[in-house]
Image: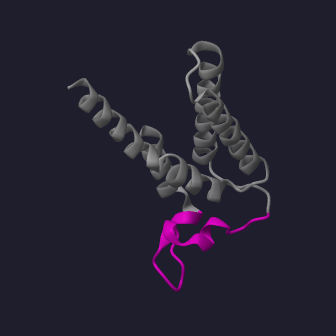
Amino acid sequence: PVSMLLGIYVLSEEEDLVRANSNYELGVLDSASWWHGWPAIRQDSLTVDNFYLIQLAFNLQCLIQIVLIESRKKDFVQMVSHHVITILLIWTSYYIGLMRIGLVIITVVADGPDLFLYWAKVCCVQVLAV
């Protein structure tokens, strides 16, 4: 949830995503702005770079924790593959300069459902505890 809020903030600060089109006033929702200026030398803001670095560090930390620290659970293989794939996607989108679309995907697709998953876990734990 915190990562999603940070991603929404970074999206709102990204000038190329927020600037409105001459035809519509969609801003971030205008998917054409996600691809604006690509392929070109990456000119994204320091805020986007920092957000990518935070996401990469978080996923590396989760991978290390799952592999080296936590006891192995039933979903060990799925969790390791999830974090490895996420790390590769973050690194690849950063390396080839697709940071705008990557920012939208990380915020909306990866972090968005986490809010509902955490809420479901809390509800499930409370129901099972009763």
Compared to residue 91, the image places residue 11 above or below, namely: below
Query: How many numbered badges does the structure rendering display?
Result: 0
Instruction: Name the colour scheme.
Output: one colour
From the top left corner, tell me how far across and down residue 103 is, in percent. 59, 52
**Quadrant containing the N terminus in the rendered view:** top left
From the top left corner, tell me how far across and down residue 51 is, in percent. 58, 42
- Name the side, left or right, on which 119 lies relative to 9: left
Instruction: Verify whether residue 23 appears in magenta.
Output: yes
Q: Nearer the viewer, residue 121 or 108?
A: 121
Compared to residue 31, the image places residue 104 above or below, namely: above
Q: Nearer the viewer, residue 37 or 74?
A: 74
- Name the side, left or right, on which 79 lies relative to 24: right
From the top left corner, tell me how far across and down residue 82 is, in percent. 63, 38
**Quadrant containing the C terminus in the rendered view:** top left
What residue do we see at 79% from left, 62% from top? 40
Q: Which region shows up in magenta?
A: 16-39
Question: Which residue extends farthest left?
Answer: 130
From the top left corner, tell me how far across and down residue 24 is, in percent. 48, 82
- Name the side, left or right, on which 81 lies relative to 110: right
User: Which quadrant of the view contains residue 15?
Assistant: bottom right
Instruction: Verify whether residue 99 appears in magenta.
Output: no
Compared to residue 10, the image places residue 86 above or below, namely: above
What residue do we see at 79% from left, 53% from top? 96
What residue do we see at 34% from left, 40% from top? 120
